[in-house]
Image (cartoon, rainbow, N blue to C red):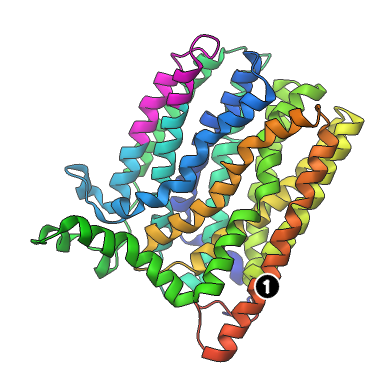
Amino acid sequence: MNNHKTLGQSFHQLLDKRFLMIFLLGFSSGFPWVLHGSVLTLWLQSSGLSRSAIGYFGAVATVYAVNWMWAPLIDRFRLPLIGRLGQRRSWILLTQAAILVSILMLSGTDPTRNLVLVSVWALSIAFFSATQDIAVDAYRISIFAQEESEAKMPFSAAVSTTGWWAGYGFLGGAFALFLGGETLGFTWPEVYRVLALLYVVMMALVLLIREPELEPDLQVAELERGISNPVAYWFTKFIAAPFQEFFARCGFKLAFSILLLLLVFRLGEAMLGRMSLVFYGEIGFSTEQIALYSKFFGGLVTAVFSLLGALINTRFGVIKGLFVGGVAMASSNLLFALMAVTGPDVNLLLVTMLVDNFSAAFATVAFISFISYFTSRTYTGTQYALMSSVSNFGRTSLAAGSGGIVDYLDGDWALFFILTALMVIPGLLLLLWIAKQIQQYRDIHDAPVQPEELSSEQA
C-alpha cells in the first residue's frame, strides 16, 4: 500500500461521487440508534425507570451481534418484485420500510403501562436496522472495484463513519433531542412520529443511488437450479464456506486473535456510551444541552476527525490508527470521571466531547478499515457481518450491564468511568500481538493475509 500520498492527493479521493452514496447509507445506519437508543433512554428515564433497567434495555441491540446468522440470506436471496432494483438496494429499501412501521408502532406505546410492548417495537427497530447494516456494509465494500479498494477503503470508512454520526449525532440525534427539549416541548411519542418522516425521505434517496456490480460468484442463478438437498447446500455454501474461508486464509491463531480483538477493544467505550445520557441528566445538564453538546457538537467533531483518521490510516496504517484510537478512548473516559467530580461544567463537557469523539472517530474508521481488509470479496456481506457482529456483541450484550454496575457502585460515576478506561488495556495488548502475527505471516508466506493487501507498514 502506498502510504506516502500528499494531503491534496488524499483529499482528491473524496471527489468520487460514490462517497456521497456511502454517506447517505451511513446516515441510514446511524439513525436507528437514536430511535432504540438515545431517545428511548431519555423517554425511559423521564418515565421513572432505574439505571439498571435502562441499561438492560440496551440488550435489544444484541441483534447487531447475531446478524451474521441471516447475512447469507441478504447476500444471496433476491427479493421478488423490488429485487429488480438490485441485490443491495432492494434489501435496504425493505428494511427501511420495516423500520418506518416499527417507529410508528413504538410511538403508540407507553413505558409506564406496557414496558414489554415498548421493548418489542424497540427490538423490531434494532432487528431491521441490523439487517439493513448487512446490505449497507456489503454495498460500501462492493461499490469499489478490488483494484481501487487499497486507496479508497480508509476514506470509505471515514465517509461511512461521518454519515453514521450525522444520523446518530449532529443531524438526526441532535434534531430528535431538540424536539423533546424544554423549548419545543414535544412529547416523546410525538418525537418518534416526526422522526418517521425522515425515513420516507431516506427511502426516496435510496431509489436515486446506483447498484454496485456483484462478483460473478455472488449471482443467485445457481440457487434456481435443481438441488437435491437445498438445506444442506445452503448451509455449506452460504454459512460454513464463508467462515471456513476466513479461518483458512488467515490461519486459526490470527483469525481467532482478530475476533477476540473485535470483542474486547471497544467494550469500555460501549459501557460509557450506554450510560452517558443518564449521567448527563443526573449531574444537572438539560435535554437541550445534551442535544447541543453531546449530539450536535460531538457528532460534528466525530465527522471531522473521521476524515483526519482516514488520512492517518492511509499514511501510517490501520494498526497504528487503532492504537491511537484506543489510547484516546481511555483518556476520554478519565475526563468523564473528572466531570463526575466537578459537576455540570460546560467547558469541561466541551473538552470531554472533543477527546471522546476524536477517539470514537479514530477507532471507528480504523475498525471499519481493519474489518474490510480481512473481508473476502466473495463472501462480503457474510464475513463483514460476522466480524462486526463480534464487535457489536461486546458493545451491546456485554455493555447492557453498565447500568447494573453503576447501581452496584452506589452511583459512584467517577469509579465507573475509571473502570471503563482500564477496559481498553487488554485490547491494546491484543492489538500489538496481532500486529506481530501479521508480520510473521508475511515473513513466512510472503503474501497478504486478506484479499486486499495489508502492508507491512501497517503492522
Q: Please tell me which residue is depicted at 51% across the width and 17% down the height of the picture.
A: 115
- Residue to which mark 1 is pinned: 433
Q: Residue at x 63, y 57 (%)?
A: 307
**Is 114 contained in the magenta span?**
yes
In screen coordinates, is 51 left or right of 40?
A: right
Query: Horizontal placement of 346 versus 10: left or right?
Result: right
Given the current orientation, which residue lies at the most extreme left position? 226
Q: Which residues are magenta?
A: 96-121
Instruction: Give the mark count.
Output: 1
Residue beneath the point at 65% across and 75% down: 435
For the view shown, which residue lies furthest in the top direction?
A: 113
Residue 32: image location, x then y, percent: 49, 35
Q: State which quadrant residue 168 falls in.
A: top right
Q: Is residue 345 visible?
A: yes
Q: Is residue 409 left or right of residue 243?
A: right
Where residue 403 sits: x, y (%)? 69, 31
| 137 versus 193 height, above or below | below
Question: Looking at numbered disc 1 in the image, what kind of residue is underneath it?
Answer: Trp
The reply to whether the magenta stretch includes residue 73 is no
Which element carries disc 1, helix, strand or loop? helix
Q: Nearer the viewer, residue 145 or 72?
A: 72
Q: Nearer the viewer, residue 131 or 7?
A: 131
Q: Return the residue found at the far right.
A: 342
Residue 130 location (% of width, % of height):
44, 43
Among the 4 quarters of the image, the one containing residue 381: bottom left
Residue 388's spot in the image, x, y percent? 50, 54
Quadrant housing the C terminus: bottom right
Where is 392 relative to 236, above or below?
A: above
Q: State whether residue 12 appears in this view.
A: no
Q: Quadrant of the N terminus?
A: bottom right
Among the 4 quarters of the image, the one containing residue 53: top right
